[in-house]
Image (cartoon, coloured by chain):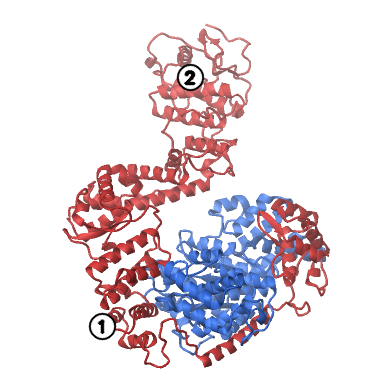
Amino acid sequence: MTSPTSRYVHPRWVPPGKPVEVHGYRIGEGMVYLGEVRDEPPEARVEASTIDPREAVKDEAGDEGDLPSFDPYRPTYEDMSPHHRAAYLRWLADGRPAEADPGYALLFLYGLERRLLSGLAPAEDPRGASSLVREVERIAQGTPSGSLRDRCQELARTARAVHLLDDDREDPLKGGENQVDLPLEIRLEVGRRIRDGDPISSETGFRYLQGHPEIYLREPAEASPDRFRRLFLHRYLDRHGDGLVVDDDLPPLTVRYRPGNPTLPSALEARVDDLPDAREADALRRTVQALADEVARDLEPVVRYRRRAGDAHDVVGLSLLPEALLQEEAPAPFSELQEFLSEVVDGHAPRWIPIDDLLDPVALPPSGWGPTAARALARLLEHLRWGFEPDPRYGGPPPGRGEEVVVFRQGGDGEAPDPDLHESVRILQHMGIAVLQAGKPPDDDVLADLAARLEARTNLTMAEVRRLEAHRRWLRERGATLEGLADRVAYLPRDARRQVGRFLVDLACQDGPLGPDERGILEEAYGALGLDHGDLEDDLWDLEPDPTRPGVPERDGQVELDPSLLEEKLKDTEEVEAILQEEFADEAPEAEPEPPTTAEGDTEEPADPAESLDARDRGLLDALAEREEWSREEVQALARDHGLLPSAAIERINDALFEVFEAPVIEGGGTVRVDVDRCREVLA
Amino acid sequence: MNDHKPQRDGNDEEIRPRERDAIVQSLRAGLTPRRGLHHIQVGRSDEVSALIDDLDRIQDGGSAIRFVAGEHGSGKTFFLNLVRNVALERRLVTMHADLATDRRLYDSGGRARALYRELVHNLSTRGNPDGGALENVVQRFVATARSEADGAEDSPADVIEDRLEALTELVGGYAFADVVGRYWEGFREGDPALENAALRWLRGEYGTKTEARKDLGVRTVVDDSNVYEMLKIWARFVRLAGYEGLLVNVDELKHLFKITQPTSREYNYEKILAIVNDGLQGSASGIGFLFAATPDVLEDRQRGLYSHDALRDRLSGTSFGGDDAVDLTGPVLHLPTLTEEDMYLLLHKLRHVYAAGDPDDYLVPDEALQAFMERQYDRVGARYYQTPRETIKEFLGFLAHLDQHPDRTWEEVLDVEDEAEDDDSEDDGEDDDSGDEDEAEDDDDLETFRL
């Protein structure tokens, strides 16, 4: 047994790998504090784990379990009994076996805690720190004690952050972290990527999403976590490719740690200057939150339907799946349907196909074929960029089993249609065809003309144009009636309904005076539009060609101006011109309303508005007139040189010169553009 | 060959070439010109006068509120721009924005703040009529204060603080004043980060109070709940900066009408009610609001503004639906749809502008104007779908074509266009390239009877 000697005066750190001998125990790998603890004021207690060689040890052979216990929660070497001291030293000498009393490992850990977080400046000795962290991780992996493992994990992660260790290494201690805050491992990983300007991959983005305490996940994320994850990753990849690059304008990462060591402060805080705090990356948080919301929203109907109908891959279930998941989850019906459609429909021309053929590859829902299933089939086809008419989603009657529908290829542009616009054009087309059919049956040219005019005057997507074409084909074959349209147009304000009516009258009158059938269908249409007979008569009076009626135009394109009204309007126009001329007149400086008390410096109001600029403004203008383009920073520097606030000066200059040029002479944000010629003109 | 002596035209005023180019270019691009609108305004002298009276009131420190109601194609947007231009000319500051699905007056999910951001983004002054004048206004305030401090041998910081005192009586005014103070601090200390943070705050870009507190030390941010209050503060602030007042133009009210959630729609109408009440009672100062909407957005009892009883009380009583008697005293100003006579006069004016105000340079005679209109209307439904904007674009295209092909007569061109239209309905017979481009980007005529 080695007795205490004067060699150990002050407690000191024994570095990893350096052997020491205490009371005959050879601690081969160091990593402990060793020295005499004395003359210290009680409040400045030295390290709890310090091995003071003066403290007695009593090495008795026998089972450790027979020893009297020591405080296993806040052990200190000093407070241990001589028996435990001996057992602890033996544990150290034996290479710190995992199966021993966790109290020894905890006491040992105190030393590492102090050394890593308090005794070593951040990133001071990465190699030394890294071997200590590995030791902490080794203890964590070996110990049967859950609380000790948690403590080790937290210490290891904190130390890795503080000492910037092993950037590319996978954290061996995944999980187990307190979820109140964004887990440190994610903060580290994302922080490093932000710092290095590397993209944040979809997987990392997803873990960020899951770990961030301020990101709220809607119910579908929990009800269908796997789908949520897959769809999230898919959309993330779709939107951000290799990943999202986040600007590093973030505050540095601050790591907080509550040591277990009773001789350390109860809370430690370290700022890692080289690492941005990913938790504060608002842009990233907002992006993933928005994406998560979108994904959850799209999965909501899926979750709701599955809850009712189970995980059935019937036509309704499939139609609710977002496109990205559809192919993954139902490859067979997906490709069968796709192949079938490609085989039977050649090119972009719509084609009549029995509805049953479309239903072959997919199962019907428990409720069987009906409006719900028909709408679902239409949705499913839309995912595949196909469609059919009559589409019950757009007010068409649901086709019965055994009936034929017009199938068309939508085209792959996938632009989102404007539902309001589509609906109004569709109703117009429907009513238009009904009206046309009442006269002589419309030929291809008449229908094509109607279509071209509707399409040319509206911003329809290609898919909508093709749908309208299929709809037209269906209407032409099955006949367009006005039945059921009253409900769909009832919502329109009266003026708009009146416009629809006039459009129909105009259409019916294209080929000359109306026949009785045309008049009949117009009356029906006006009825459906909620307009009365008088309205129809008025519109017919205006629009129906009648060569016998005096003053009525022969063609729709005739313009008859009312001279007295024209005279009145001309007078009104002259009045407004006078009013506006007064407003926009180049103001004589005397009459000019008091301009804002402007700049630094005062000037009298001279006759030339350009001279209302003071010397400093003119100086700046003179400098800017040297060239046409300046960076914002250069302009700021110039303005400062002239003792001016840049934007205010530019505002004043522009304002003053507006009277001359009626346009700003200095414009722009990041790059400031100067109208050099005009500036020189003023300065000359 | 295309020279035509003047017939009758009520305007012999010469137009500067630069102004002429600006007007023609803007109109051909489907935009409202910034300047020279008086050269193309047809009629509506009463409506214009009424709005000018409103601007007078704003300049006098009062308030104004108007709803410009008109059918699609009746020139609401043009009218709003005209008033905005007059306001800028009178040294008011203007803000404008279209409501949209993601921009509302009231919301709890950030859409009201998005409207605020758009309004501030478009903040304009006469020197910066295209928006982006935020920093100019702030600096002008600071410069004014500096100049006052120089005169009084006072410290600029004290003067700024004194002047900002006026804001603190308004809700949110303390924070606004603090932020402007921070901006000055940033400028004085050469700390662009602080200047930037202050501008970000004023633009409504701070999403959390924590962030704002960290950067600027203020505990309030612009959020969904205080957008209107912030606009009132702006109105006072721009006056402190030496401007005459603030005009806020909000177009496309239909997006409130389209909100499907009744409660959410109701809350938005409540916000409008607050603005209307302030405007009518004069409790807001130096600020005017101009909203544009189709009549159904106002009148519809189910979903329109009139579905809100208090709003209906405040707004109704003015005439709608094309009655001849137009009430200009109420907050709703009805713009009648343009008649053929209006269009005819407009074409006259465009011809005049195109010739830079010189009747000797008119490219076509009066009868060509009528023939052009007839050709425009000679299409299925064109009379009902053609908007003035399109007619203007096409007419200027027609003039440009004649200008570039002096060997052709207008009769030939109109005939050629008829044939061309048969071949290609999308082209509308526009021969030159720029006209085609213009054509492609427009055409939302069916909007009036969307469901």
In the rendered view, tell whether residue B230 sits above or below residue B384: above
Quadrant of the rendered image containing residue A498: bottom left
Amino acid type at image mark 1: Gly
For this orientation, the residue located farthest to the top is: A1
Determine whether, in the image, residue A415 is placed left or right of residue B67: left
Image chain in red: A
- Viewer-nearest residue: A197 or B191: A197
* Circle 2: residue type: Met
Q: Are marks 1 and 2 on the same chain?
A: yes
Q: Dividing the picture into quarters, in which one does residue A178 lie?
A: top left
Q: Which chain is blue?
A: B
Q: Secondary structure at mark 1?
A: helix
Q: Which mark is residue A520?
A: 1
- Looking at marks 1 and 2 on the same chain, the residue that comes earlier in the sequence is marked by 2
The circle drawn on residue A80 is 2
The residue at the point 29 percent across, 58 percent down is: A350
Q: CA distance from mark 1 to mark 2?
A: 108 Å
